[in-house]
Image (cartoon, rainbow, N blue to C red):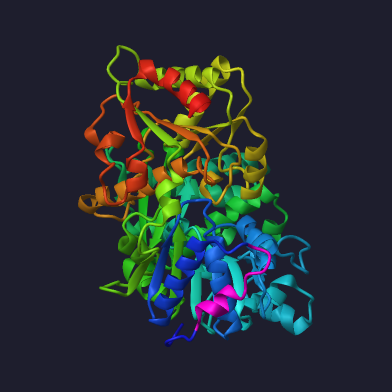
Amino acid sequence: MTEKSDLTQDAVLDTFWKVEKRDYQIKCIEEIVNSLNKNRDVALRLPTGTGKSFVFMPIGIASAGAGYRTCILCATNLLMSQMKNRYFPRFKSKVDLVAVKGIEHYDCSITGQKADYFTCTREQREACREAGYSCDVLKYGGELEKHNLIVTNFHKFLSTPIENKFDLVVIDDSHGFENAVDDKFQTLINYFRIEDLYHRHEPRKDKVSDLTGNFLDIFDDIINSMPPAQLTRKVADDDISKIAEIDKYVEKEELQALDTLDRGIIYELLYFIKNCKDITLNTFFVQKDYYNPEDRREVSLISRKSERYIKRVMPSIFANSRVILTSAFLGRISTHAQSCTYRKYDGSQLVTVPKEKLEIVKKWFDSLYIYEVTDLVGGSGDPFDEGVELIAKMLRATAVKSLLLFKNYRNQRRAESGLRREVERDITFIDDSYQTEQVQELVQKADVIMASASSRLWEGIDIRRLRFEIIFSLPFIRPPVYMDRRLSFPYVKRKMLIRLQQGIGRLIRQPGDLGVCVVLNYSKEPTRWSRLESHKNDANFSPDMRERIIRISKNDVCDRVKRTLKEG
């Protein structure tokens, strides 16, 4: 809200219709309304399953009804649909909730295919408008500007210039929005995707093979210029200038003739090349795979906007709006909020809700058990293989729905063959090739789910009846290539702890749920940072989960898990 608002708690509570008002939700609503009226941003922190949506949804509805432009942001289109079709109808509203998706979700009247950001340019849309085409992109393109109550996804919000700014922005699952901000200003190209595309088109000798072949030649030169032991480096301007010259080989008509997979990869490449043309606005890096640096197929090129550019754009996106950030685990609140909005928070400008721990929160994790295995490392064998054997033993001893989380896709794939051989249970392997809607459908039917900490499973997926979870190792991410290495560890540690808690928190969806999580550490050369015990007192780790950690040996954990799941 650009100025002090006159939103009232009564107006918010009057929107409740086909949903029960819970005392703790009313308390949170009161605190949020008071904070918004004092022109402050809010961080709403409640465990997964407590009904955060029924706190911010009525606030958004009442705000829009009072004439304030309100936008609710979701990680995915699946969550947008839930907001519009499942939650919104339970409230009374003076205004409609309008869902706005990205260009790629609408049909193009000219091509008969899904629209995209390369053929559906501003100039093309102007031509369509003048020609009088009935176009979904044109129809919905202005929706963000004219309605008072909008639900949209992170990418659409960050990518669309809006003149009629919002007064209130609600960010659901804001831990994901922080990652989306990073992705918005960074483009990554994997060597293997371009190489595979080249091999598919090289026999045809078409312009796609020319484009990808030329790109790979330059990519090879960049990789060859790196010392073997070096994992990241800035790319020379001369190499970037060479890349900027190669997009003349492919025209729009040829793009439209490609199949969906190839067209998507070409769009990624052309967008990267466009960034190469805007060399003054971008910084370019090359990054080898940490676990297999000699495999050039795993090397990536990264284009990132300058920090000066990002610090100029982000404040203009939020403008003077008030912001509500919501998540179960936010880590250090001020750091998280600043990473999302790029605002500087001093003193009372940011309020955490609820101010005092609610009774329901105090009891929420009473039936959560976190077992940290302390001695997986130390034997004569490979700790990774021993970890897989231990996972197999636990899965054979239990029969409940289970989730296996690996630090990265490489470990997930490596463990798969051993588990399928040792465990006679239905194993569902989730990777980033699945759309979020597909993942949601798969996990509901699954018995044992395998996923990595970077998969789509983290994008608001609800896994019903989940009772057992094994985290193969703490889900540390790689430091960003643009970050000073002296500052990188606090950054990756905070990200790891939030991701870890998001994973564990999926076990408890409502009061009375019983959940068991086992945390392993398979590192051949463990340090204190690879142990959960070393992080449990960190400010980014929830005290509620801290109290649930039990250290245990590998010889005892299987029986303890079996007994806990049976007896609680």
Tell me: 269 left or right of 41. right
The residue depicted at 62 percent of the width and 53 percent of the height is 264
Instruction: Please report the residue visible at 68 percent of the width from the left and 62 percent of the height from the top.
Output: 105
Between 421 and 289, the residue placed more toward the observer is: 421
Q: Which residues are magenta?
A: 7-19
Residue 208 in picture, x, y percent from top left: 61, 51
Q: Give the overall secondary structure of the magenta segment.
A: loop
Q: Does residue 370 appear left or right of residue 51 in this picture?
A: left
Residue 226 locus on image (x, y percent)? 30, 43
Q: How many marks?
A: 0
Does 217 sit left or right of 76 as displayed? left
Q: Position of residue 471 (x, y in %)?
A: 43, 33
Residue 22, placed above or below residue 434: below
Q: Nearer the viewer, residue 526 or 565?
A: 565
The reply to whether residue 479 is visible in this rendering is: no
Q: Tell me which residue sits at (56%, 43%) in the image.
A: 432
Figure quadrant of residue 307: bottom left
- Using the image, determine if residue 456 lies above or below residue 140: above
Which residue occupies the foreground of this view, 116 or 400?
400
- Residue 223 in percent (x, y) is at 37, 43
- Give residue 546's quadrant in the image: top left
Q: Let me know if residue 199 appears in the view.
A: yes
In the image, farthest residue toward the top: 380
Residue 447 falls within the magenta-colored stretch: no
